[in-house]
Image: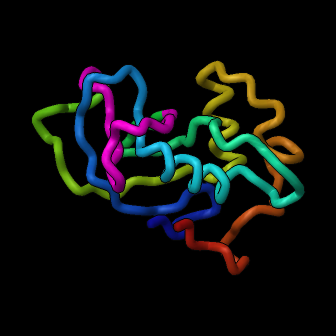
Amino acid sequence: MFERFSSSYFLGRLYVEPYDGTEAAIHRTEHERLNECVYTDGRGVERVDYPLVMKLDTAHFPVVGDDGVPSGTLALPRDAVDADALPDDRPVLLADAPRAAELLRYAGYDLDDLVPGGPGETDGPGPDRPDDRLA
């Protein structure tokens, strides 16, 4: 679904549509799976409910899991997008753990335990590591 795009982002395609929710959302199962790939370090049980951070065009969105969102879809609050341009199949960037933690902290989230080692941790997926594709 997503492949490494740069040192801070993965690139994928999602069907993007406006909806009446207050937060950007993807299907809960996909959210948990991506969360495991992006945020966990394999050293034990870790939370998989932190918001992901996705970028569409020039806007970043904290993304939560929601069972009501269809698989393969990024649902965005109507007031946050140009609803006339959606729905549409679009390229979407997914921030990796250090970048997501940085962006979420800017947005006011308390994520001290989100990224092992905090911002700048480099033991996760990267351009030279075999796990550069996120399911």
Asked where in the image residue 89 lies, by quadrant, the reply is: bottom left
Note whether 80 is above or below 134 in the view shown.
Answer: above
Residue at the (74%, 23%) spot, across then down: 110
* In the image: residue 40, left or right of residue 127: right
Q: Position of residue 25 (x, y in %)?
A: 41, 37
Residue 38 lies in quadrant:
bottom right
The reply, left or right, for residue 5 in relation to residue 126 is: left
Q: Would you place residue 21 above or below residue 49 in this image? A: above
State which region is magenta: 62-79
* Residue at 76% over, 62% down: 124
Residue 66 vs residue 131, the one in the foreground: 66
Quadrant housing the N terminus: bottom left
Name above or below for residue 76 compared with residue 125: above
x, y percent for residue 134: 56, 66
Is 120 positioned to the left or the right of 17 in the image? Answer: right
Residue at the farthest front position: 67
Q: Nearer the viewer, residue 78 or 106?
A: 78
User: Eyeballing the image, is 38 above or below 67?
Assistant: below
**Residue 119 on the magenta span:** no
Q: Is 86 positioned to the left or the right of 10 in the image? A: left
Which residue is outermost to the left? 84
Q: Quadrant of residue 49?
A: top right
- Please name the residue shown 69% across and 49% down the image: 97
**Image coords of residue 64 (percent x, y):** 50, 35
